[in-house]
Amino acid sequence: MRRSLVALLALLTLSGMLPASAQETIEEARARREAIAQEAAATAGQIDALNAQDAEIVAALEQIDTWIAIQEARLDQARQELAATIEVEAEARDRALVLTNRVSELEVELAAQLVDGYVQGFRNDDGLLLDTADLNSLPLLRFVIDETSGITTATTDQLRLAQDQQADAIAEAEEARRQAEALQAEIEDRIVDLEDSRAVQEELRAEVEARIALLENEAQVLADEDAQIADFIRAEEERIRLEEERRRAEEEARRQAEEEARRQAEEEAQRQAEEEARRQAEEEARQQAEEGADGGAETDGGAETDAEGDGGAEADPDAAPEPEPEPEPEPPRNGVPNFARPVDGGISSGYGYRTHPIYGTVRLHTGIDFNSPFGTPIRSSARGTVIFVGAFSGYGNTVIVEHGNGYSTLYAHMSGYDTRVGARVSQGETVGFVGSTGLSTGPHLHFEIRLNGTAIDPAPLL
């Protein structure tokens, strides 16, 4: 197949060359170009359409179309030439028939004049007639013509001219007939060539139509899956929102319960303090009453307090160290996460509507394709939570990360995963590896950014 393509491209190059010689006539140049086109078409017909690349099929089909156009033009020309030749033959035969009648008329007229001259007699020696064995001999005819009274040379000249014209007309008709037969044979040969070329053309067109149908089916699959992904992300975001609301409600309830417990503890502590103060006051009053009854007892210079200030509690050496706080991510720009490129490598296809370069079908490319080698680690574009790890038929192995504020990222055609659903990933953390699963023609990463489930152009956000 590759050799056929090389030959086809070589023929395409030759077809654009100038005539080999400055003295080459137009007909020779046309014949040479037709021969090149015929060879190109024959080479194109040898391509295996099922195994050929798209460009090979289109190039082959173009060569077949060109050859068929040439053949049809030459066939029309040959048919016009055949019609003109048949008309020439008919006119020549009609003219020959008229001349045949004219010859017959002149022969009758000449015979009548000869009879008249014979009856009237000859001025020369009648022995010429008596001594001539062949009555059709030229001397006799000349003698009769010259000597017969009433016979003119004009009649003889007219007869000879009519006979010559009759012969020319018959010869022209015969030549036209031979040309018509040759043209008819050429037409039949060209029809056979056309039928063969059209058979190859139909085969190639059928393959093109099959591939267009496949592309349209793939586009529909991707469109359906795009809708499924959008619905899934919206459902997940709603679930996450409800989960967050539930968590916040539980947190608020817990906080309120703790606050209520703290308040109650403080009230109980205050009540106990007040009770202790009341008890101490009662105890002091009782002691003073007893001292008054005893005539006054000596009092100490002041009771020393048992409790001494400890200057603060000492840290427990066996206590576990406090965990270091997790670094806070860079704050989002107006609610938009700070996205980064998920892989190194060039961009092979951007976001937007694109037309297939060969078949002309149009579809939306919902992300960016990064041209990275097989197995390249794929990094999370921003901090978030993994909400999907699995396969979509068109997208292949896919990971979706939710980043908050309605934003999510999608990584498709992976060869493998390095994360799980529910995992919280940091920006730059590996979530999978470049592959070629799903509707893919080679290793690359299909990367999407979605807002509220709908794909948007990632380029301005990277």
Image: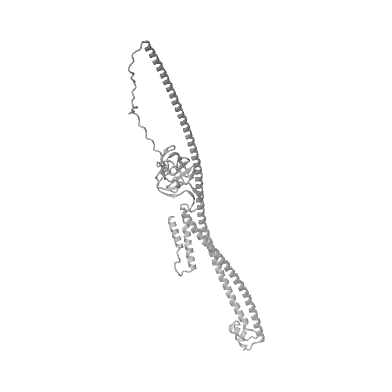
Q: Quadrant of residue 177?
A: bottom right
Instruction: Answer yes or no: is residue 174 visible.
Output: yes
Q: Viewer-proximal residue, 305 or 243?
A: 305
Residue 81, percent across and down? 56, 67
| Depicted 327 relative to depicted 161: above or below | above
Asked if residue 164 lies left or right of residue 322, the reply is right
Q: Is residue 48 in view from this perspective?
A: no
> How many labels were placed on the picture?
0
Q: Which one is nearer the viewer's eye here, 211 or 238? A: 238
Q: Please state the horizontal and vertical placement of residue 183, each as a whole percent of the image.
A: 54, 66
Q: Position of residue 452 (x, y in %)?
A: 49, 41
How far across and down, in percent of the image, does residue 326 sit? 39, 36
**In the image shown, does 223 or 58 lie closer to the viewer?**
223
Identify the image quadrant of the N terminus: bottom left
Q: Is residue 445 above or below residue 8?
A: above
Residue at figure coordinates x 66%, y 84% from the top left: 116
